[in-house]
Amino acid sequence: MHKLLASLLTAAALTGFAGAAEAQSRIKDIAAVEGVRTNQLVGYGLVVGLNGTGDSLRNCPFTRQSLEGMTERLGVNIRGSNANSKNMAAIMVTAELPPFATPGSRIDVSVSSMCDAKSLLGGTLLVTSLQGADGEVYAVAQGSIQTGAVSASGGSGSSVTRGVPTAGRIASGATVERETGFHLANMNEVRLTLRNPDFTTAQRVAAAINQVYPNAALAENGTVIALRAPGQMGMAGFISQVENLPVTVDSPAKVIIDEVNGVIVMGDAVRVSTVAIAQGNLTVSIQETPFVSQPEPFSRGETAVVPQSDVSVEEDLGRQMRIVGGGASLSDLVNGLNALGVSPRDMISILQAIKAAGALQADIEVM
């Protein structure tokens, strides 16, 4: 009985280890459907209702022109008048149109000041059309702006600012007026694009799909996998089934180094050949001790400051050369480097030296 229990525990442990070693990801997390994407929108508009923190009309001619054009459309002519209100500001409005957005749906917008406005807090954006890259209007924005910032100033010129009061957002501030025209249901074939191109991963994705839906997927290259819905299954339903299939992702051996912050990131595929490493710190200290040279009484000498320098050299001792075995895994490599007792910045130099010696089977990318 005890032997059986021990065997079951051993098998469970090995099964858990194998599952951890072969971690899998869903296809939806590593790939996207070609054409199903967001689209950037942009527009120019006016914000009104500011408490004296808006643009100066004398310094911002486009704000004045926009005010004149807007009031003329409303039947009021202010051209030639000496208006100098600071309760309005010219702003740029940006938004992202999500895929399959339909007319009448709401999206968030961001607003940013264009001239010398001090704050957009409490302002209201007037009706602003948002255009796509093709020049067509896809949404219309309007609403109250929330900046999430605080700005205050005194009469003497002192001021305190927290955050960025000249930029803000309008939650659900735009109404979609036009669709992008991407009709997924009418398509016989779609293409998946991997977010991290890799030939092995592309073949694994195609194999995982073909195992469930034979001859439905073909890896065209390291990025694109072509899909064709089988039988009478709709394309949306087919993609819904495909994107939840598990796949083991493969990645090239790479070491990412951020020298500014002293950060090192290594992938699981990083391997190192047999190499011996020794590391020591050499410290050169220079201490300046100036003293005053005083002449003898009644002599013709002059008092002078004479520099005196003490130079010392110290080197860390007792660090032996260590050997990292050939074909070492990532954990073995990390343990070997940690055994040297070095800082991350010293480890960066060690990794670069190992790469220069031809013993590191990975690409080094410096950020």
Image: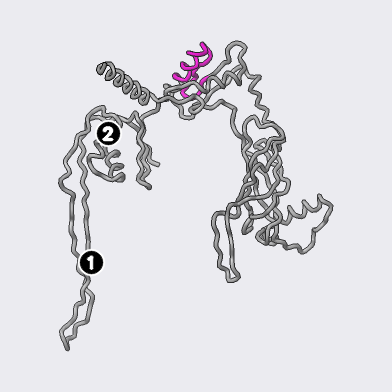
**Residue occupying the point 64% across, 55% down:** 121
Residue with the mark numbered 1: 288
Is 215 on the left or on the right of 13, as rendered? Answer: right
- Where 103 sits versus 113, above or below? above
Q: Quadrant of residue 352?
A: top left
Residue with the mark numbered 2: 333
Q: Which residue appears farthest toward the right when viewing the image?
A: 75
Q: Is residue 75 magenta?
A: no
The magenta-colored residue range is 203-225
- Image quadrant holding the C terminus, namely top left
Inspect this view and state whether residue 358 appears.
Answer: no
Q: Which residue appears farthest toward the front when viewing the image?
A: 1
Q: Position of residue 319 (x, y in %)?
A: 17, 44
Distance between the Cα atoms at labels 2 and 1?
Answer: 43 Å
Q: Quadrant of residue 298?
A: bottom left
Label 1: few (<14), some (14–19) or many (≥20) C-alpha neighbours in 10 Å: few
Is 147 on the left or on the right of 336, as rendered? Answer: right
Q: Position of residue 141 (x, y in %)?
A: 70, 43
**Residue occupying the point 63% across, 50% down:** 146
Dot 2 or dot 1: first in sequence order is 1
Is 130 on the left or on the right of 287, as rendered? Answer: right
Q: Position of residue 175 (x, y in %)?
A: 70, 39
